[in-house]
Image (cartoon, rainbow, N blue to C red):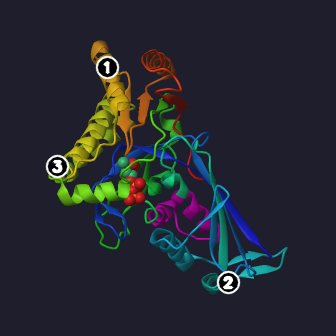
Amino acid sequence: WVVMATGRSPTNIAVIKYWGKRDENLILPINDSISLTLDPLHLSATTTAAVSPSFTRDRMWLNGKEISLSGERYQKCLREIRRRANEVSDAEKGIVIKKEDWERLHVHISSYNNFPTAAGLASSAAGFACLVFTLAKLMNLKDDLGQISSIARQGSGSACRSLYGGFVKWAMGNNTDGSDSLAIQLAEETHWTDLVIIIAVVSSKQKETSSTSGMRESVQTSALIKHRAETVVPARTLKMEEAITNRDFASFAKLTCADSNQFHAVCLDTSPPIFYMNDTSHRIINLVEKWNISEGTPQVAYTFDAGPNAVLVSPNRKTAALLLQRLLFHFPPNKDINLTSFVVGDKTI
Ligand code: DP6
């Protein structure tokens, strides 16, 4: 016999960035972060997990190719889910998997993501969120989404925010065991439906410094990161929550741009400095800043993760159309940039 479960997770884009861990092992951050979950149409992971007494070891395939599960992050997630697993029964098929059976049964996992391969966009957030959620479904975990998010966090920090749809905060927590470092939904996707998100892919090259090692180097060498985590982000997080609650785009945009710029300033303040943005990224920032200044109020927000691709948020479809026009005027399509638009989307299902 075989028992299976399937899940799908969208990716998320941080508007208050997570950068820096206080515990590398448990993946505990030095500050709160806030993100928007995207609709899963273009960027999501879909995972199917199966259990059968005929399986002799845990195995996983990613986009059809077998990958190793021996990495510490995979092992931690698997161990934690097995520890919390419960009985599963299917009377029709006469199958009963007892709680204690999960320790000796093996799983086969197949995961696909629809991230365009050349997109240069990280898929680990959606990937780990989906892996953990699907295994939790298969093994009948009774824990709430917040608890599930704290398991996903141990796969990749940003993954914990993909469990919820809409607007999500990863509360850094205080406990040394990480039990209160989890995702919380601030508002559902239906709360602010006017927002349009445009991702401008400016390079499909693999980034040179991974987030994991980049943030480690920042924590070890940057003086600015301490000020950011202790003073700037706590105040900014409160303001961002308020801006989201009030659908106040002007504040939302100012905070989003400021936080992206400070995150990249921390990268520059790291020794040796880390450059994630390129010339095209800087030109996009200029274009948006000039436009915002000329209108007297923010029209568009920009944010950049650990790479040169721009994520642009506009308050409505009309502004999004104007933004696309301006981008296409300044950057030849397909040569410099590739554009895709999104709306704020639903949770992992
Ligand atoms: C710049 O979640 O990829 O995207 O926890 O080491 O797996 P690990 O790092 P990861 O870092 C994401 C960093 C970021 C900002 C963010 O998403 O908040």
Location of residue 286 in the rendering, given as x and y in whole percent from the top left corner:
30, 23
Q: Which residue is mark 1?
A: 292
Mark 2 beta carbon near ligand 1 (under 8 Å): no
Please tell me whether mark 1 sits on a helix, a strand or a loop: helix
Q: Which residue range is magenta in the image?
A: 128-152
The answer to whether one can see residue 20 in this image is: no
Location of residue 299 in the rendering, given as x and y in whole percent from the top left corner:
37, 21
Kindly identify which numbered label has been placed on residue 224.
3
Kindly identify which numbered label has been placed on residue 147.
none
Observer-nearest of 179 and 300? 300
Spatial CA distance of label 1 from label 2 is: 60 Å
The kind of residue on which mark 1 rests is Asn
Q: Quadrant of residue 214?
A: bottom left
Q: Are marks 1 and 2 in contact (CB under 8 Å)?
A: no
Q: Which residue is mark 2?
A: 98
Residue 162 relative to residue 65: left or right: left
Location of residue 63 in the rendering, given as x and y in whole percent from the top left corner:
64, 55
- The verdict on residue 134 being magenta is yes
In the depicted structure, whether residue 23 falls above or below residue 192: below
